[in-house]
Image: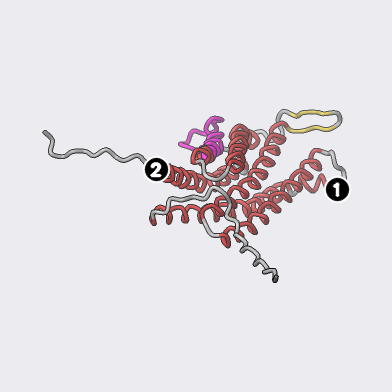
Amino acid sequence: MNPIEEKEQAPLSEDAQKISLLYRSVSILLWAIPLYLIFAVQTVFTDYWKLFFMGRLDMIGILPTTCTAALAMYGMILLKRSRVGNQLFQKEIGFFVWYLAAIVALSPFFYWFSQAPGAQILRLGRYAFSYFGTMVFLLCLVLLYSLIVLSGVVYKLVGMCDSVERRNEAGVFMIFNSLVAAILMLVLFLYQLVVSGVIVFGNLQPLCFYFSSQLHYMFVLCALVPMAVCVCWLWHVRQTVFQKILNGDLQITDDDPVPQKEPAPTEEVSS
């Protein structure tokens, strides 16, 4: 008879499962979001990926961004499985998973556009559009809109895990995030109209072509700001959840904390 008897591990409680999945999902997003930006910039602004000295292989070129987007999608699926928050928050997470699925499907166009930016010209009337360029333009719009949605998700996560003061502080940053991302979407839309010839204004189109590389780098630097803010607050959520685990506090509020107002004093009616 074996003197060492293995004890069956007690199943985790519902609160423990919630906070465990929340911690794992936030940790995955902390890795996936910055890596996606790095891989996207590396794919677009270089001719090819030198991976294992294989040269130009389409399957190698599309893997970095596509796999990273799939990793972020997996992190959001874990967040949905954790069932934290109210039903409205869970519905928002469900929509965000579909946005990430669209990003996964469109991410290969980063590499294909870098290989042949002017290939497969689509003509609509007197306007000509590059197929790969148009798909990258749609991908960038989806990415910017996803940053707006992610800002709302992070704001609600801070409210669930931390104090009301910290939630209000996060709200200011997330409003700033949404404004920057919305302005970038508008600028990108106008830039696409100018480049495609839909909007004709003086020598604006030749200038856009001449300074295209500089404009692309400026766009990446501006998009880095809301992404960095989201990553910073995701790090704060991760640290807060980790501290809760260490302290044994496994409670996550289902709704955003709202400061309770003190009841107004009732006036006594003199007889």
Q: Is residue 127 left or right of residue 173?
A: right
Q: Amino acid at mark 2?
A: Ser
Residue 199 is covered by the magenta coloring: no
Q: CA gap, disc 2 to disc 1?
A: 66 Å
Tell me which colouring the rendered structure shows.
Answer: secondary structure
- The numbered disc on residue 216 is none
Report if residue 252 is visible in the image: yes
Q: Residue at x 64, y 45 (%)?
A: 149
- The numbered disc on residue 13 is 2
Residue 57 is covered by the magenta coloring: yes
User: Which quarter shows the N terminus?
Assistant: top left
Q: Are the residues flagged by discs 2 and 1 in contact, CB closer than 8 Å?
A: no
Write down the residue under mark 1. 203
Find numbered disc 2 in the image and state the secondary structure of the residue it sits on. loop
71 vs 147: above or below = above
Find numbered disc 1 in the image and state the secondary structure of the residue it sits on. loop
The number of callouts visible is 2
- From the viewer's side, name the closer residue of 74 and 93: 93
Provide the residue span drawn in magenta. Answer: 51-74
Q: Residue at x 57, y 49 (%)?
A: 255
Q: Quadrant of residue 175?
A: bottom right
Q: Residue at x 80, y 32 (%)?
A: 128
Q: Quadrant of residue 11?
A: top left
Disc 2 or 1, which lies upstream in sequence? 2
Q: Residue at x 27, y 38 (%)?
A: 8
